[in-house]
Amino acid sequence: MTAISQIELMHRFVHRKLEVWPEFVAVLIVGSVAHGEARPDSDVDCVLVFDKMDEAIVPAEFVWAPATDSYHTIFEVEASDVGGIQIDAKRVALDDFRRQEWPESFKHELAHALVLYDRRQSVAEILKNRVAYPESLRLSRIRVHLGSAQYHLEEWRLLGWIDRGGIESAHDQLTAAFEELIQLLHAYNREWLPWRYRWMVSAQRLSWLPDDYPQKAVEITSRVAATKESVLKRRSEIRFMLDDTLVRLQSDGLLAGPDEAFIAAHPGLGYAHNFDTWRGTHRKLLRMRGMPENRT
């Protein structure tokens, strides 16, 4: 069954089984069908919105058989055997849909949702506002993930991990750096992070990616050997993409320089970028306490 026929069956299901209920408001298609990844045997993940939730209206996980207009558990029949459709539904009340805090992975799904039915043409507008990616969050995440990736990619640090915990420890640091890069790219593209197992798939579909990202992602994730040369090669590939991203951030005016991410993530006094200010406040504190001033 193709995604198109799944959607057609969903239209039929909504018309025959849900529209008759006055409290039924909307249905949003999410998951593999919405992402264009559905297999012939895929179920349809969806969000069903009601003015007032009543679980007796429709099951949560089921097969609907059009010929008999009947519900079945997923263990009783195969959807393909009855010309039907398997549905995995998240049932929510409209007030909860408006106000409830959503996990980020759910926001990712809803950001790509297909609005199949919207009785009062109101849920689509609510959805648009709730999945908007705040610019302040975007800038904050860009700085945090850039700074973390830079930290993990310091060559002296990687070599230190080889001495401390072996080659596998250095590779673990590089995996952490690559994950920070993926999160950085999602933030730059104003894309909510999906469930962890979907990070790679989601990253490949982002609007902007560093040059040669698909090829380099394969090399970083699958061409790993227990050698120092492999560690340095992986570092070089990640570093190349991070530097490309940094150039993009600077050209967009999101960062003034390569050190800004660290500075923004460490606003407290006593770091290299504000050590002179710390010295002044330290001397002032010593004088206030009547303590002898050290050479600082």
Image (cartoon, rainbow, N blue to C red):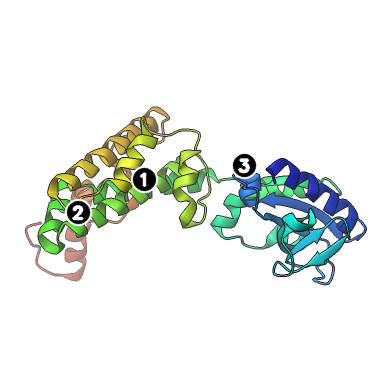
- Circle 2 residues within 10 Å: few <14, some 14–19, many ≥20: few
Can you say whether 89 is above or below 271 in the image? below
Horizontal and vertical percent for residue 266? 31, 53
Q: How many angstroms separate mark 2 from mark 3 (CA)?
A: 59 Å
Which residue is at 57% across, 60% downward? 103
Q: Which residue, as the protein is rendered here, is positioned at the far top?
A: 251
Can you say whether 82 is above or below 113 in the image? below
Q: How many angstroms separate mark 2 from mark 1 (CA)?
A: 37 Å
Q: Nearer the viewer, mark 2 or mark 1?
A: 1
The residue wearing badge 1 is: 181
The residue wearing badge 2 is: 280
Q: Nearer the viewer, residue 16 or 192?
A: 16
Horizontal and vertical percent for residue 131? 62, 48
In-image side of 132 versus 138 (left or right): right
Horizontal and vertical percent for residue 62? 74, 65
Q: Which residue, as the protein is rendered here, is positioned at the far front?
A: 81
Residue type for callout 2: Gly
In-image side of 278 versus 63 (left or right): left
What element does badge 3 sit on? loop
